[in-house]
Image: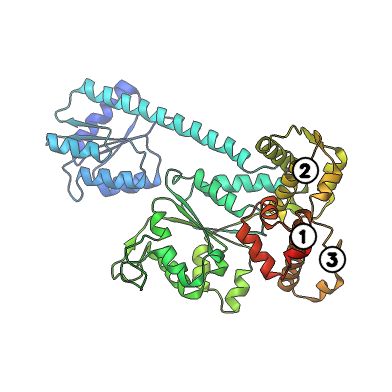
Amino acid sequence: MSERILLVDDRKDMIAFIQRLIRKELGLDVEGVMRAKEALRLIEAGDYNLVITDVKMPGMDGITFLEEAKRKKKDLIVIILTGFGTVDMAVAALKKGAYDFLTKPVDNDRLVHTVKRALEYGRVLREKEALEKHVRHASLRRELIGESSVMKELEEKLKVIADTDETILITGETGTGKELAARTIHRFSRRAEGPFIAVNCPAIPESILESELFGYRKGAFTSATTDRKGLFEAADGGTIFLDEIGDIPLPVQSKLLRVLQEKEFKPLGDTESVRVNVRVIASTNQDIEKKIKEGGFRDDLYYRLNVITMKMPSLSERLEDIPLLAEYFLLEYAVEYGKNITGFSDDALEYLKQRPWPGNVRELQNVIKRAVIFEKGTVIGREVLEESSPVGDLQPGLSPDLFGMDYRTAREKIISDFTRGYVRYLLRKTSGNVTHAARLAGIERQSLQHLIRRYEIDASEFR
């Protein structure tokens, strides 16, 4: 395809002259317009490789046009051509992103040489961008492990989403990798050089969540002895990931809505707004539409968050990926713990494919981790996997009582029964040693203690 050149000049004779010169010397057509606003419309609608613009024009001057054009397409190559050039003007133009600055009357050979060089530079940039995109997409396959059709569809969706700057809501069951997906989107986006701030919303007490997100000024409350930036301000230029957005209290939801709408917020105790350039990715494993009907979530905030929705598949939807995931986790933990384990027995792999995984990929990861720790041979067999799976304290099947409940209640009961059995298994395995049990589970000791208290489990009975 021929490279496209756009010329902006308020003199018809200059447009005709440059068109003839470029066609004669480079064999390329030049599209000419006499108004900067018309050029901006064409740039937005078309795909130009190079823009040549005059400076002195009615309505909008060339330097302002340069800024507006680069704002619409930051990688656009622009040559400034003017009869009223000064050193200061040239420096200003180059600082604002001009490729070169030429003064009239321009030497024909120099103009042709500059245009030729600019087009070659554009080709290099496009080749570099295509190579980087190929590398990003290749590494995406390593981020999202799986060959199932649902994972291939997810991979294609992530490629598209990463190239946008829209707000995203990631849904899916616990343990499906929602935060991994958010980090992957950030890493392959234009914001990759900026910060990625992950916020576990349920883990922050409601009383301090607002100040954590939006910061505060000295004197805003008794213990506010200095100004403090919030997480939104810390994420400026990057991405903020709000994990389990459904647990954010209503007063904070109002402030979050303003950030999404206006890109600004007021820290606690401040009368001035702070503007931020932040992409928001949120996640939830809850039925937000049900929460809206119950009055627990703002519908306008939901619609703002739900610009793009991405559902993470459960492990039951991608059973064919289990062997691949298991091999990946085996390699990771064999290296971490210095074990010479080469793989799984056929019986072990069959067990992994048939066993239910209510905790999804995270549960599979923890089972493989424990199996690597306790395996004494070079191949993981079924027996060590069964010992590493807390199924002994769980119901082997679903209780008939569950089918008399609504989905949310039944789901919460299954999770509650699973968690209680899982914690009891860990404590039995470690003879009541909470620190060791937390290490096996891959969670913090305080988190395990919280589960022990919540489910009224007496650790001492296992000692």
Which circle marks residue 463 in the picture?
Answer: 1
Which circle marks residue 374 in the picture?
Answer: 2
Residue name at image x 30 percent, y 21 percent: 25
Which circle marks residue 398 in the picture?
Answer: 3
Q: Can you say which quadrant of the picture contains the N terminus? A: top left
Report the Cα–Cα distance between label 3 and label 1. Answer: 31 Å
Please state which of residues 161 and 247 is positioned toward the viewer in this rendering.
247
Please state which of residues 428 and 34 is positioned toward the viewer in this rendering.
428
Q: In which quarter of the image is residue 122?
A: top left
Left or right of residue 48: residue 310 = right
Left or right of residue 56: residue 204 = right
Left or right of residue 284: residue 269 = left
- Residue 63 location, x and y as percent? 21, 43
Given the current orientation, which residue lies at the most extreme bottom position? 294
Residue name at image x 26 percent, y 36 percent: 98
Going by the numbered disc 3, the residue's amino acid type is Leu
- Residue 264 location, x and y as percent? 36, 63
- Residue 431 location, x and y as percent? 77, 56
Residue name at image x 40 percent, y 40 percent: 47
